[in-house]
Amino acid sequence: MNALSKFADKSYRDGFVQHRVRGGIAYQLQALRTKFGLTQTEFAQRTGKTQTGIDHLESTAHGDASVQDLLDIASGLDVALLVRFVSYPEFLERTADMSVEALQPATVFESLAAPAGVSEKTMSKDDHEELTALRGFVAASGYIRCDNLMCNCGSWHGGHANDRLIEISEYLRSYGVWRGTILDTLRSMLTCVR
């Protein structure tokens, strides 16, 4: 029997897709919030939403996320959003893995920091641990996202940026991996572009 045969029934396939999409959005928002270690209130502030709005979006019962909601969240988290119509086999393949890890995409900064041709999903366990440690080091260094409404550059700023950059450089040098790429990325992150 073909795995798609039950999808011949319109009410089954419509219900399946709606359940999988609504659940997928709710579960991915929860996974992203976990990845960044944020409460619903902190997540709401970072994405320009209300805590109640995030609570509704994280509920599979509501399922009222608009594309604009998702775009705002993607922007606030520095991840991309993909919304597209696909065939049922592709839909099933893309939504098969609902693990927390599969629902936590790399941010643009994590992608930029990875060596060319290597994604977070394909890097070695050691490199992944190093990247995780680097994220923690940068976060602990006191850097914050630029929230200057006139600037809106998305850069990271912190007290004594040059001193912090030297600390990060020394930290990276102790590992010797991705030295140039991560340092260049950090410099661009720490420099306001406007």
Image: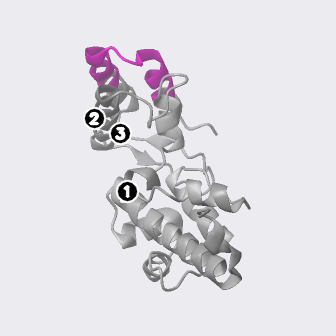
**Disc with the residue nearer the chain's start (2 vs 1):** 1
Going by the numbered disc 2, the residue's amino acid type is: Ala
Residue 86 is covered by the magenta coloring: no
Label 1 belongs to which residue?
Answer: 100
Going by the numbered disc 1, the residue's amino acid type is: Val
Label 2 belongs to which residue?
Answer: 133
- Relative depth, front residue between 73 and 124: 124
Going by the numbered disc 3, the residue's amino acid type is: Gly
Kind of element beneath mark 2 = helix
Q: Position of residue 182 (x, y in %)?
A: 44, 25
167 with respect to 75 (left or right): left
**Residue 186 shows in the view:** yes
Q: At 53% across and 68% down in the image, what residue appears?
A: 48
Badge 3, how many Cα within 10 Å: few under 14, some, many 20+? few
Above-or-below relation of 143 to 76: above
In what quadrant of the picture does the C terminus appear? top right
Task: Identify the image quadrant of residue 192.
Answer: top right
Q: At 47% across and 29% down in the image, what residue appears?
A: 113
Label 3 belongs to which residue?
Answer: 159
- Relative depth, front residue between 160 and 106: 106
70 with respect to 45 (left or right): right
In what quadrant of the picture does the N terminus appear? bottom right
Task: Report the span colored magenta.
Answer: 167-186
